[in-house]
Amino acid sequence: MQKSTLLALLGSLLILPFAYGQKYHSGSVVKSFQANDQHGEAYQLDSKTRYLLISFDMGTGKKANVKLDQKGKEFFKEKQIAFVANIHGMPGIGRLFAFKKMKTYSHRIIYGDDAHLMDPFPEKDDHVTVLKLDKQQKVTQISYWDPAKEEVDQHLKE
């Protein structure tokens, strides 16, 4: 292999993690995605979504679901919320029980089951990431909700 080709290849490998490792931040445009909810219905992120809530782990997701269920289905419509729960990597037996439970909640839970769907979303341990979006799906605010200690309302202010 020629020296210039080898250098170009090595340079590309060094840049690759930075190109794909970018997290959404204030001013970023969230790339539209499609996924199914707990009832098997298709969801696509669009300009109607004002708040995007992302749960990365099962424990935090369970706590968030309890709090969100108390708010009711209309709360989601009123505030234009989409809630995405990371289920990628969840073992089959876990899915059996988790999916059954998720179907009982009144609010819509979007399944984040794609290996790379969650990658660009900022994350904080034991918190739900809350992205406030404008009509062009641009992030205008990022906050982190701890469903074990607080209500979601303070993260959904105009």
Image (spheres, helix red, strand yellow):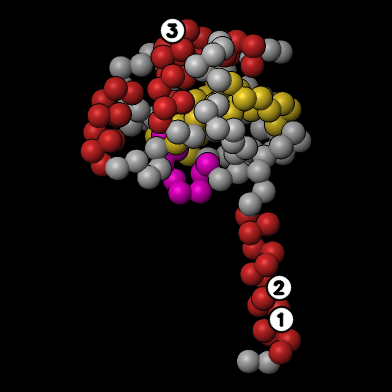
Q: Quadrant of residue 138?
A: top right
* Side (left or right) of 106 relative to 131: left
Circle 1 sits on which residue? 7
Tell me which residue sits at (30%, 29%) in the image. 98
Tell me which residue sits at (40%, 22%) in the image. 62
Quick one: SS at disc 2?
helix
Membership of 130 in magenta stretch: no
> Can you give x and y, in whole percent of width and height, for residue 121 in the image?
60, 39
Q: Which residues are magenta?
A: 109-118
Type of residue at label 2?
Answer: Gly
* Side (left or right) of 19 relative to 82: right
Membership of 113 in magenta stretch: yes
Circle 3 sits on which residue? 70
Type of residue at label 1?
Answer: Leu
Mark 1 crowd level (few <14, some 14–19, many ≥20, 10 Å Cα) = few
Mark 3 vs 1, N-terminal side: 1
* Picture layout, residue 50 above or below residue 23: above
> Looking at the figure, which quarter contains the N terminus?
bottom right
> Can you give x and y, in whole percent of width and height, for residue 49 in the image?
59, 24
Q: CA distance from mark 2 to mark 1?
A: 6 Å
Tell me which residue sits at (47%, 19%) in the image. 64
Mark 2 crowd level (few <14, some 14–19, many ≥20, 10 Å Cα) = few
Q: CA distance from mark 3 to mark 1?
A: 57 Å
> Looking at the figure, which quarter contains the C terminus?
top right
> Can you give x and y, in whole percent of width and height, for residue 28 in the image?
72, 39
Q: CA distance from mark 2 to mark 3?
A: 51 Å
Type of residue at label 3?
Answer: Gln
Do residues under tags 2 and 1 come within 8 Å of each other at their CB atoms? yes
Quick one: SS at disc 3?
helix
Circle 2 sits on which residue? 11
* Picture layout, residue 110 above or below residue 90: above
